[in-house]
Amino acid sequence: MVELEESNFNNIIRQIIKKSLFTERQIEIILNQRDLLESNFSITKGAYYRQVGQSREKLIALFYSIILLRGLGILLPDDIDVISKLSEQISVINESDIFSEREGEVISVIDRLIRQACNM
């Protein structure tokens, strides 16, 4: 029987990570590097630091992308407001228990708001 690896994240956070530019491991590493998560990694030291570098480069690229999109007027102030409000809600969701039957609804609302903001 295959043993499932225990996650540090609830189902909603895992679904958001899947749709992001990052892997779950990279998010764990970023949180660990910022002293926001204590996690034991079952990988070699070299592999860990390679992933630290990859995570850092993705984060830098993300920041540059946000600056570029905002500077060119593609990412508008209203979009930033939506992102900020969703981020606040994710923070609440991360700290609380959500009934599994409601998880789909929460993901659906987040997805709809993001797609609305990205409507081209």
Image (spheres, helix red, strand yellow):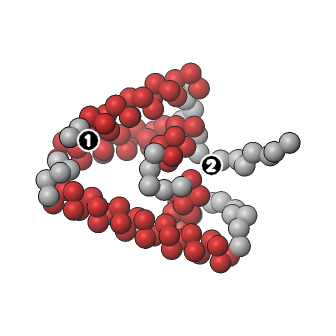
Identify the residue at image location x=50%, y=48%.
17
Mark 1 — residue? 118
Identify the residue at image location x=72%, y=49%.
5
Task: Say which amino acid is labelled 2.
Answer: Asn
For residue 71, which quarter of the picture?
bottom left
On the rendered image, what quadrant is the N terminus found in? top right
Would residue 7 appear left or right of 30 to someone viewing this image? right
- Check the image and report above or below for 89 versus 39: above
On the rendered image, what quadrant is the C terminus found in? top left
Residue 38 place in picture, x, y as percent: 63, 60
Task: Say which amino acid is labelled 1.
Answer: Cys
For residue 69, which quarter of the picture?
bottom left
Mark 2 — residue? 8
Would residue 60 appear left or right of 1 to someone viewing this image? left
Residue 67 visible here: yes
| CA distance for labels 2 and 1 | 29 Å
Residue 109 place in picture, x, y as percent: 38, 29
Residue 85 place in picture, x, y as percent: 31, 40
**Residue at the extreme right:** 1
Would residue 54 appear left or right of 116 to someone viewing this image? right
For residue 57, which quarter of the picture?
bottom left
Judged from the image, the secondary structure of the residue bearing numbered disc 1 is loop
**Residue at the extreme front:** 120
Identify the residue at image location x=57%, y=74%.
50
